[in-house]
């Protein structure tokens, strides 16, 4: 019998339950996620652990904002939890947002989960998918511009002109990018080593990972959303940034 994969902590599930999600539905979401991140999880960046970090940060920050409606909180946490679901990717490669959306649309268990959460909290599967589009990232400016435009089109199609959505899409994208660097520097280094393995086939990227990480983290540090993070998160992030800056020279 194959050894069962050890799962990372998923505190966001408890947050979903505190917002009204049945425990059985949380257990189904946990099992769904556990089965849909291929590859050696200790050697990659876009694995289940990263998913849990993004969803946990989303849940933790939303807890401190009581004016955000309960259904919106669940919608954001669920989008965070599902944003890298891509079970058909080649192991050791990054998750693909288009493949994630296709899986959520076509997989029976994914459709059932989205429908049940949506029925309970008054949102649609298409709205979850539109927010997932906000997390699509490219280090290349023209590609990133096109991805942002795709998110705007998709969100307007399913949310209308709701002014809430562009801002929360931006926050979700930011939390996706920064969550890995809010724990220990050692963990950040392990994740970046996994990211290097995922990206090494991209010939367009001539820089070493230390310099890539320094530039990426410097951009996150300058974003106004950084100041909304708790002080301990900011302190740990600054330690990681300083470490990569020393490597980059």
Image (spheres, helix red, strand yellow):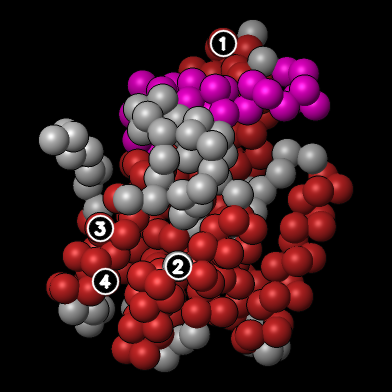
Q: Distance between the residues labelled 3 and 1?
A: 39 Å
- Name the residue beneath numbered marker 3: 31
Are discs 4 and 1 less than 8 Å apart at CB? Answer: no
Instruction: Classify mark 4: helix, strand or loop.
Output: helix
Q: Distance between the residues labelled 3 and 4?
A: 15 Å
Identify the residue under disc 1.
247
In this rendering, which labeled residue sits more in front, label 2 or label 4?
2
Q: Distance between the residues labelled 2 and 4?
A: 22 Å
**Percent position of residue 201, x then y:** 68, 23
Camera-nearest label, 3 or 2: 2
Position of 234 with respect to 105 (left or right) is left
Where is residue 4 drawn, in percent x and y?
A: 17, 39
Where residue 240 appears, as percent x and y from the top left, is: 46, 26
Alpha-carbon span between mark 3 and mark 2: 14 Å
Q: Closer to the camera, 16 or 174?
A: 16
Residue 120 placement (x, y as % from top left): 32, 89
Reading the image, the residue beneath label 4 is: 16
**Is 186 on the left or on the right of 18, as rendered?**
right
Q: What element carries label 1?
A: helix
Q: Name the residue at 56% across, 10% down.
A: 247
């Amino acid at each position: 019998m194959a050894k069962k994969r050890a799962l990372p902590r998923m505190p966001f599930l408890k947050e979903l339950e505190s917002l009204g999600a049945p425990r059985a539905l949380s257990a189904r979401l946990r099992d769904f996620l556990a089965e849909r991140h291929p590859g050696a999880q200790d050697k990659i960046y876009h694995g289940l652990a990263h998913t849990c970090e993004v969803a946990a940060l989303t849940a933790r920050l939303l807890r401190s904002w009581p004016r955000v409606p309960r259904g919106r909180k669940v919608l954001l946490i669920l989008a965070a939890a599902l944003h890298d679901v891509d079970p058909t990717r080649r192991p050791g490669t990054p998750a693909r947002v288009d493949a994630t959306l296709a899986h959520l649309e076509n997989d029976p268990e994914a459709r059932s989960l989205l429908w049940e959460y949506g029925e309970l909290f008054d949102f649609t599967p298409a709205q979850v998918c539109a927010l997932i589009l906000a997390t699509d990232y490219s280090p290349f400016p023209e590609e990133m511009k096109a991805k942002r435009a795709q998110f705007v089109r998709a969100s307007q199609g399913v949310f209308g002109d709701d002014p809430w959505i562009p801002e929360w899409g931006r926050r979700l994208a930011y939390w996706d990018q920064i969550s890995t660097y809010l724990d220990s520097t050692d963990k950040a280094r392990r994740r970046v080593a996994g990211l290097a393995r995922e990206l090494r086939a991209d010939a367009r990227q001539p820089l070493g990972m230390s310099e890539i990480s320094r530039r990426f983290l410097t951009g996150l540090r300058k974003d106004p959303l950084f100041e909304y993070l708790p002080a301990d998160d900011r302190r740990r992030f600054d330690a990681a940034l300083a470490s990569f800056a020393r490597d980059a020279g």
